[in-house]
Amino acid sequence: METNFIFAGFGGQGILLAGTILANAFMIEGKNVTWYPCYGAEMRGGTVNCEIVVSDSEVSSVHKQDTDYAIVLNQQSFDRFITRVKAGGTIIANSTLVAEARPRNDIKYVFAPMTKLANDLGTSKVTNVVSLGVLASACSIVSKEFLAKGIEKVLGEKKRDLIPLNLKALDGAFALS
Amino acid sequence: MTNRDEKVLIKGNYAIAQAAVNAGCQCYFGYPITPQTEIGEYLSGKMQELGRGYVCAESELAAINMVMGAVATGVKAMTSSSSCAVALMQEALSYAASDELPVVLVNVMRTGPGLGYIYPAQGDYNQAVYGGGNGDYNLIVLAPSTVQECVDLTYRAFYLAQKYRNPVILLADGLLGQMMEPASFGEYPYPEVDVSSWALTGAKGRDARMIYSVATDEKKQIQHICDLHRKFEVIAENETTYEEFEVDDADIVLVAFGSMTRNIKAAMKVLRAKGIKAGCFRPVTLNPFPHKQIHALAEKGKEFAVVEMNMGQMFKDVKYAVEGLSNVSLINRACGEWLSVEEIVSSVENVLRGGKQLAASL
């Protein structure tokens, strides 16, 4: 059983970091996982995305044509990745920056005002972690507990002081969704 | 083999760099190029911390020659680069092979020819296996397929280079360099090789030594080339490595190297679920190439489909190994988006229906 996730948004929204936290959460849970970024001439304000594949057995292709979940934090990413969601898959969108449209009727939609939630917590910088909380509430194979461990692992000793704020963002988003 | 400790989620490039540190690499010389720049970035801090050597060279040509100088003194050293910049190092690789210098070179492949671009590709198979340098020489070429193997084969590259006094290329690709996957490092699992009989360490208390490749005496040069080739026969005998999956009852064997291996393994499962007896074969050493093992499978009547991200470079080696005993097809794309499992499956079905290779060319 293999499931994949695409995170996409503006450069600077913490897209690659959100994916890294999710991949760490799966690793800590003992699953096979890969993380693959778009790479190249990227810049702050441009678009960025990464793909996470999780599997019970060895991960097959790390970069797939379609996806089970697309987590999109801006309008451009919604427009670009909605076509890549599998029939029956889910798109999770940041409704602070994405219009609540439902152009396809064969996929599920989750709209959450992620940037607003993050701002309410004190900083838009935790929008990416808010998106993880929303994902955990919408997807049974993503566990909030392991995401919390992933946050602790990724932030580590050097950024230990930021862990409580991020855990609060995760919990807040999960509770509201 | 190693004391495996906790797994870390790590990029292929960083995994190669940390493995080089663990292997005892004393000097790194390099010049940045996407998609392998993280190797030099990581080592620029790490080597300084450890009191080892790091030089951001003025060019790739300089970097590889610095590696030659360093390894001639008996220490472990490496450089890393990508495709079009590895092209600049070909002259030095020919010299290093002739001088029997244990150079370690990491090539994280991107797209060529010419400057190409940063998309991943596997188009440097020929460059690595057949070489762009002059004369009759062989490099040992190792092709990792996972981030864990980026660690394991970097360890092996340093060991084989010194064990056989032969340059080694670790042939990775942009996808592997950029992706993250859990890996564990353990300790460097190989014994230290005694280099005291040849290393240039200063002639105090002994006769002077020279390492050079100029040969004005024809007979001596013939002898030297034959010696190099005999050495490589020993390497082929001892070090040829490959993996095979479910080949025993297979009618068609998919062959891939590097990170494409994971896609053919997944395709094999899908094909088997559809009732097609597929197996997989993956050379770990591209040079020495497992010709004998592929030939043995061909003798059992199995046909082959080579799946690679180039215009059919390893395909020729597989055909050479099969020697016309069975059908060999090519499933390929020039560069960029890796062939998907679905594309491989439909191409194999097409081949088995008697169609030509698919062409997932665009």
Image (cartoon, rainbow, N blue to C red):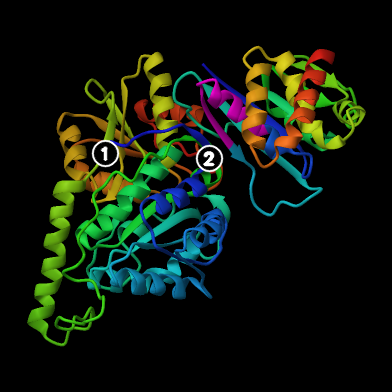
Protein chain holding label 2:
B
In front: B47, or B221? B47
Quarter occupied by the N terminus of chain B: top left
- Residue B133 higher or lower than B311, as above or below: below
Q: Which residues are magenta?
A: A19-35
Instruction: Tell me where residue A149 appears, x and y as whole percent.
Output: 63, 25
- Residue drawn where x is 26% and y is 24% of the image: B251
In front: B27, or B170? B27
- Residue drawn where x is 35% and y is 18% of the image: B276
In the orientation shown, which residue stands out farthest toward the bottom?
A: B216
Labelled disc at residue B95: none
Left or right: A121 as drawn, with respect to B162: right
Left or right: A149 as drawn, with respect to A31: right
Q: CA distance from mark 2 to mark 1?
A: 25 Å
Protein chain holding label 1:
B
Left or right: B12 as drawn, with respect to B64: right
Labelled disc at residue B242: 1
For mark 1, give the secondary structure: strand
- Residue B167 higher or lower than B156, as above or below: below
Does B240 appear in magenta? no
Residue placed under numbered mark 2 in the picture: B10
Question: Which mark sits nearer the N-terminus, 2 or 1?
Answer: 2
Quadrant of the image occupied by residue B127: bottom left
Q: Amino acid at mark 1?
A: Tyr
Instruction: Tell me where residue B35 appears, x and y as whole percent.
Output: 55, 54
Residue B191 visible from this viewpoint? yes
Q: Amino acid at mark 2?
A: Ile
- Residue drawn where x is 81% and y is 32% of the image: A127
Instruction: Tell me where residue B227 appears, x and y as whole percent.
Output: 11, 67
